[in-house]
Image: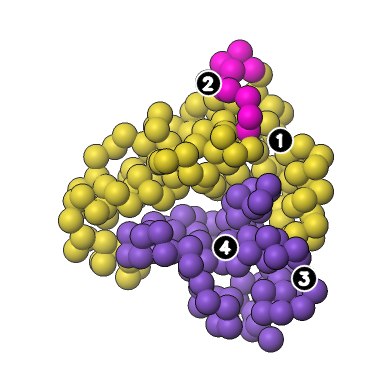
Chain colours: A purple, B yellow
């Protein structure tokens, strides 16, 4: 889908902006790509936002965008509770 | 950091692969050989410095976000992103053409085949936003 990679990469900009350690997502991404390969991007919705790796978080936002930016559902909960408020460690309420 | 201790147990090949995989390993800059976790850090640092150097030397194309990209970013992220003038698109791509993003004051770089359709033009002037980085 046009723009989905752009949205995914902006997810890393978001992570850098809202992290105390700006480079957190770079090293997190390294770790999980070494440990998990391409599955570092895979996720199963339902966990707390902070439990996901950097690539998984970016993929969640990307998937919400691909799905047409719905106003309900688990992915919307991440947008509402974490992404828009800029709170990576806030609880996600489903 | 636990990932560091874990990474030191990996083979040099795996860490080399990590350095290339992450941050995207720009083909022009990511040529360091990595044998330890510390080297992995150095490789990422070198990659980072290489990208910044290329931007400052105007050997890669750099631009700020276009209006439709700003609108798209706002639609998805609302006002949770840093000032979008600080997000730059660079005509570099990572391994296998993958997009990557590096922070400076915040540098967003996306593979040229995906977003940046024009080839890098060495004569292209550096965008004003780049000077702040």
The residue to which callout 4 is attached is A59
Is disc 4 in the same subunit as disc 2? no
Is residue A72 left or right of B61 when viewed as pictured?
Answer: right
Q: CA distance from mark 1 to mark 3?
A: 29 Å
Q: Secondary structure at mark 4?
A: helix
Callout 2: few (<14), some (14-19), or many (20+) C-alpha neighbours within 10 Å? some
Task: Answer whether residue B17 is magenta in the image.
Answer: no
Question: Where is mark 1, residue-wise?
Answer: B64
| Vertical side of B129 occupied by A43: above or below | below
- Residue B93 coordinates in the image, percent (x, y): 49, 37
Q: Residue at x 41, y 41 (%)?
A: B95
Q: Is residue B56 above or below residue B22?
A: above
Q: Tell me whether circle 1 and circle 3 mark residues in contact (CB < 8 Å).
A: no
Let me know if marks 4 and 3 both belong to one chain: yes
Residue marked by disc 3: A70
Which secondary structure, mark 3?
loop
């Amino acid at each position: 889908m046009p723009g989905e990679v752009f949205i995914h990469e902006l997810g890393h900009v978001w992570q850098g902006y809202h992290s105390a350690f700006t480079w957190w997502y770079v090293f997190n991404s390294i770790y999980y790509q070494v440990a998990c390969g391409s599955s570092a991007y895979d996720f199963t919705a339902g966990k707390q936002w902070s439990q996901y790796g950097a690539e998984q978080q970016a993929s969640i936002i990307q998937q919400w965008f691909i799905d047409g930016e719905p106003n309900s559902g688990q992915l919307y909960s991440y947008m509402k509770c974490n992404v828009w408020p800029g709170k990576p460690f806030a609880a996600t309420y489903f | 950091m636990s990932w560091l201790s874990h990474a030191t147990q990996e083979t040099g090949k795996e860490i080399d692969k990590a350095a290339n995989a992450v941050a995207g390993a720009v083909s022009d800059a990511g040529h360091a050989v990595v044998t330890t976790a510390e080297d992995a850090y150095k490789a990422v640092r070198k990659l980072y410095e290489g990208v910044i150097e290329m931007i400052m030397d105007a050997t890669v194309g750099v631009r700020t976000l276009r209006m439709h990209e700003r609108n798209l970013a706002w639609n998805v992220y609302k006002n949770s992103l840093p000032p979008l003038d600080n997000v730059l698109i660079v005509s570099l791509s990572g391994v296998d053409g993958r997009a990557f993003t590096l922070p400076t004051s915040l540098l967003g770089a996306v593979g040229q085949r995906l977003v940046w359709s024009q080839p890098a033009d060495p004569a292209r002037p550096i965008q004003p936003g780049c000077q702040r980085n």
